[in-house]
Each structure stands twice: as C-alpha cells, then as structure tokens.
Image (cartoon, helix red, strand yellow):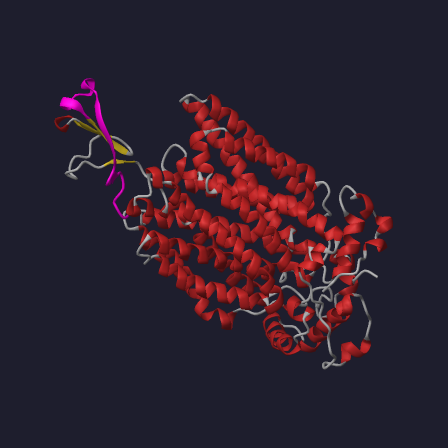
C-alpha cells in the first residue's frame, strides 16, 4: 500500500488540517517563523560555498605579460641596442643587433613583466605562464576533484550522522582552511588546501540542499531550489564587487575576505537544528522533542498536537510500509526500527539504478556547460569584472522564469525548455564566433548568445537541485544527491580546461555543450514527474512510484509490473 506521503498535499489539505491550523501532512505542522529562521542560516552558508568554488576566476586570472629584460627596467617588446627582442615566452638574440643578420639564439624567460602587479594573482606571483600555464587551470581542476571526493565520502555521512553535523563541521573547517590558503607559501601548499576546500564545499552543498529541501512542505517545495539559486547567483555578484574593490591588492586579501563569511559557523551549533525528517526516519525521539518545543513556540502551535503529528508520520513509514498503529501514536517509548540503505540499495534496485544513470548524465552535461561558460567569462572581450558581473546577473532572469515554470509546467517540462534554449543558443554562438573575423556586431551577438546559454544552464541546475532529491527515499536522499554530484564533478573538472580548448579550437566548447544539451532533452522524457508528490520516505514507495509514473514507460517498468519490481534489497 502506498504511503500517505505519495498523495499530493493539495488533494487532502482540506481533510487533514485541524481547527488550530495544523497540517497533518506537513512534518512541521505549518509554515512559520521557525522555518524562515532556519532557512536564513542555510542560505547564508550558500554564499560561502559559491565564494570558495568560483574564487579561482579572479585569484587565478591570467593577465597580459611578456618576457622581462635582463636589467628589469626595459619593459618594451624590443631592445635593439642589445640585438634582443623580448616576446611572450622567450627572448631572441640577433647577430650585430639586427634581425636581418640572422637569429643567434633563443632563450627562455627567467622573469616576466605583467600588466598587473606582481602579487595580484597566483599566476603573476608564481609565474604560471607559458609552459607552466596549465598549473593555473589545474588549481580549479584540483578543487573540482576535491568536490568529487566530498560527494563520495561526505554525502553518505549525511545520511548516517545527520545533515546538521556534516554541515556545521564543513562550515567551520572552511573558515580555517580558507584563511590558511591565503598564507600558502608556495604553489604545492595552495593546491593541497584547495583540494581540501573542494571536499568541504561539496559537503556543505550536499548537506545544505537536503536540509533545506526537507524543511519545505510539498506545495511550496520548488521554492527551495529557486531561492537557493538566487542566493548562489547573488554570491557571484557580491564576489565580483569585492574582487573589484580589492583588485589592486594581493590575491591573498580576497581569499581572506571571502573566507571570513564562514565566521557564522562559530554560532551555528546553537542556531541551526537537524532535519525533522531525518530524525523521524531514524527514530531520534529525544532530539525530536527538543525541536518540536522550539517549533511550537516560534510557530504558535500546540506541542502535543505536533508530537501526535510526528508520531503519525513515524507510524506511516515504520518498517517501510503504512501502518495505523494506535499504540505507537500513544506510546512515546515505542521502539522504532529505521531503514538502513547503502550503495547496494541502488545497485540491486533496477528501476532506481536506471533513473540514477539518467540523472548522472544530466548533471554532467549541466555542470560541464555551466562551469565552462562561467570560467570563460573573464576571457570575453571587454572588462573582466563587468563580463563576469553580466554572466552572473543573467542568472536572475532564468531563476525568475523558474518560479513561474516550475509552478505551471513541473520539473520535466522546465528541464526540456531550458536545455532547448541552451542548445540552440550555444549552437548559434559557435557559428557566430566561427564567422566573426573581428566583426564587432557578430562578436556582440556571439556574447549575447553565450550569456543566454549560461542563463538557461543556471535555470536547469536549480531545477536539478530540487528534482534529484525528490527521486530518492529519505535515508538515501543525500547519497543519491552525492552520487549525481560525484559524476557531475567530472564535467566540472573537465570544464576547467575549456578555456585552453577554446584558444586552440574556438568552436569546440560550444559545439560539445550544445550537442550534450540536445541529448538531455531526449533523456528527460523518460523521467517521472515529481510535482504534487510529497518527498518519499521509504524504498518501497519509491519503487512503486517509479513504475507507475515514469514519463515514457521504461519497458518492464510499466504499471502492470509494479509489484514485480519490488526486488529484495541487500541492506
């Protein structure tokens, strides 16, 4: 029998709402000041994750440079009195001081002259140019690799130890490691610290997304992703302003300033609570009671009514099936058996495994495209700060559209629209860029098309952060998010070198991005729609729901075989 959670809240709110305004289908009873305060802290932490992820755009910026003259005073490209020309990556010496008498020797540069101050970025400080240029992009790739490790190792911990524990630990360590990175004495130390920051960043994102999602009731749950994405985009805008103000200082000041946003972690233990959904599924009654006292006080609800509501929820998911056990509802000391899942759960449940593969490809596509376009923003023609600002600002457009589209169209149709816009825009940008030939009007159109593609990818990623957790039961929800994010980091890691590819083959990045977007449009048609469905609590709910609600039916997973899909899962 399907759980009560599988029934859309809108269809039963009238019959499940008490005279005191308590919504029996919502774990917190009703929306109120308590949830808004919890969300304020969680969303603020998103700023910190955005800063640590994208700060490389500014601290690893590669400015114009050339080989420095031997006396460190001549910064021109030529020095005819010595018969030497100073080029980008080497200096050439000619016989008798004249080019027409022939080249005598070519030597590599020992020092470089930059258009920015020596310590402005890690590129200028550590001379990461010419044959060492890949090391600048490697720092961003290493951070992405850290995200992969974080998704693999941290996300399962969220499901076992709780969302708050992981979120608080990662936030506090981000403060310590982030400031430490500003004092890195050499490149190797910086790379190691950036890897650790990648692990912590992913831990904060995964725990924060699920923590936020589990606070919302079904009818407004899509707002979790939209508001979170607005905060993330605002983080990019705020970071641009801070980077602009500190552009004449060492990159270390920018690293310290942005890391100090994690100071809120020092009071986070007392201000942020664990997810009630996680506590309920894992039977943590003492912690549940403490939180319900706070909810009742802040939201002006009766504590006993809230406790009965929670016990009812525990009864409906006990042992993975719906029960109406009145003894459980009355006895606070009833022993509760929580479902425990692992990676074997996904591998041994074919319907979930297929859906997981589909989601992983979509995550790879969106992250490869989004980060590729974002990291290349400062290389566009014009002021790098202004270009990055516009690249971030266009995200507000897609997020505003998301509010309407998710409410009216649902998750599937919204993903199709955004990937269609991205695929067409990036194809157009690739064609325009190929035929531009210094034509300013075509260059402008190419930039507009690229920003449109970036806008669409922002909208799609915000949908994924909402859509993906909705496909997994509570005790594997963080693991499902972590799995998709792990694979997605591969795309993000590769995107670190999109700029290098563009310098050698200008049309290649756009072509790859657009083709993958069109493939996603086909894949999305096979996914089940989650609009109007409460978050699934148990594995059995999910398997039946997949079988009955897949978009284009997945062969053997049609409705008539729903019961046959209930495989035995090895815990």
Q: Is residue 110 magenta?
A: yes
Quadrant housing residue 339: bottom right
Residue 406 in picture, x, y percent from top left: 65, 46
Residue 139 as seen in the image, left or right of residue 206: left
Q: Quadrant of the N terminus?
A: bottom right
Residue 566 as seen in the image, left or right of residue 408: right
Viewer-closest of 419 and 351: 351
Viewer-closest of 376 and 103: 103
Residue at x-position 64% and y-position 79%: 286
Q: Please, which residue is most extreme toward the front here? A: 104
Q: Quadrant of the C terminus?
A: bottom right
Residue 293 as seen in the image, left or right of residue 326: left
Q: Is residue 3 magenta?
A: no
Q: Please, which residue is most extreme toward the top here? A: 100
Relative height, residue 50 to residue 570 (above, below): above
Q: Please, which residue is most extreme toward the right here? A: 560
Viewer-closest of 477 and 302: 477
Residue 33 visible to an observer of this rendering: no
Residue 95 in picture, x, y percent from top left: 16, 23
Residue 164 visible to an observer of this rendering: yes
Q: Which segment did they paint magenta?
A: 94-120
Relative height, residue 304 to residue 11 (above, below): below
Residue 248 as seen in the image, left or right of residue 235: left
Quadrant housing residue 72: top left
Residue 570 in picture, x, y percent from top left: 74, 63
Residue at x-position 30% and y-position 56%: 185
Viewer-closest of 299 and 120: 120
């Amino acid at each position: 029998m399907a759980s009560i959670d599988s029934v859309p809240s809108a269809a039963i709110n009238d019959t499940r709402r008490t005279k005191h305004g308590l919504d029996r289908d919502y774990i917190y009873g009703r929306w109120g000041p308590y949830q808004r305060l919890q969300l304020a802290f969680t969303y603020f932490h998103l700023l910190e994750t955005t800063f640590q992820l994208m700060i490389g755009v500014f601290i690893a910026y590669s400015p114009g440079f050339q080989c420095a003259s031997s006396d460190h005073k001549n910064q021109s490209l030529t020095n005819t009195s010595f018969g030497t020309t100073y080029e980008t990556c080497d200096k050439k010496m000619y016989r008798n001081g004249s080019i027409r008498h022939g080249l005598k020797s070519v030597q590599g540069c020992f020092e470089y002259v930059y258009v920015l101050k020596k310590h402005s970025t890690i590129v200028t400080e550590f001379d990461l140019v010419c044959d060492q240029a890949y090391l600048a992009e490697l720092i961003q790739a290493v951070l992405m690799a850290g995200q992969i490790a974080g998704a693999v190792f941290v996300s399962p911990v969220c499901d076992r130890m709780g969302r708050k524990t992981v979120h608080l630990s990662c936030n506090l360590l981000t403060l310590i490691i982030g400031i430490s990175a500003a004092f890195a004495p050499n490149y190797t130390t910086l790379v190691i610290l950036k890897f650790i920051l990648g692990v912590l960043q992913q831990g904060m994102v995964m725990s924060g997304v699920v923590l936020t999602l589990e606070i919302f009731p079904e009818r407004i749950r899509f707002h979790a992703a939209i508001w979170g994405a607005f905060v993330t985009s605002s983080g990019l805008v705020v970071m641009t302003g801070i980077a602009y103000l500190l552009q004449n200082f060492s990159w270390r000041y920018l690293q310290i300033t942005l890391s100090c946003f994690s100071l809120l972690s020092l009071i986070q233990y007392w201000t942020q609570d664990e997810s009630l959904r996680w506590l309920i599924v894992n039977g943590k009654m003492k912690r549940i009671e403490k939180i319900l006292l706070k909810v009742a006080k802040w939201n002006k609800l009766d504590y006993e009514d809230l406790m009965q509501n929670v016990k009812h929820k525990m009864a409906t998911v006990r042992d993975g099936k719906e029960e109406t056990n009145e003894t459980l509802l009355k006895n606070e000391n009833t022993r509760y058996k929580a479902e425990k899942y692992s990676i074997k759960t996904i591998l041994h449940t074919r319907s979930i495994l297929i859906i997981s593969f589909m989601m992983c490809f979509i995550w790879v596509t969106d992250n490869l495209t989004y980060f590729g376009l974002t990291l290349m923003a400062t290389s566009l023609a014009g002021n790098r700060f202004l270009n990055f600002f516009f690249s971030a600002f266009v995200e507000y457009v897609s997020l505003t559209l998301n509010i309407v589209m998710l409410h009216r169209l649902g998750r599937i149709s919204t993903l199709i629209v955004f990937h269609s816009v991205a695929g067409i825009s990036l194809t157009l940008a690739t064609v325009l860029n190929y035929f531009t030939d210094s034509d300013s009007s075509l260059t402008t159109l190419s930039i507009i098309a690229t920003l449109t593609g970036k806008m669409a990818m922002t909208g799609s990623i915000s949908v994924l952060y909402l859509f993906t957790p909705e496909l997994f039961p509570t005790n594997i929800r963080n693991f499902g998010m972590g799995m998709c994010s792990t694979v997605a980091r591969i795309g993000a890691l590769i995107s670190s070198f999109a700029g290098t590819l563009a310098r050698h083959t200008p049309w290649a990045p756009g072509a790859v991005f657009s083709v993958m977007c069109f493939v996603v449009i086909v894949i999305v048609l096979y996914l089940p729609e989650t609009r109007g469905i409460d978050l699934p609590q148990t594995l059995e709910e999910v398997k039946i729901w997949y079988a009955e609600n897949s978009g284009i039916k997945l062969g053997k997973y049609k409705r008539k075989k729903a019961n046959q899909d209930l495989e035995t899962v090895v815990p």
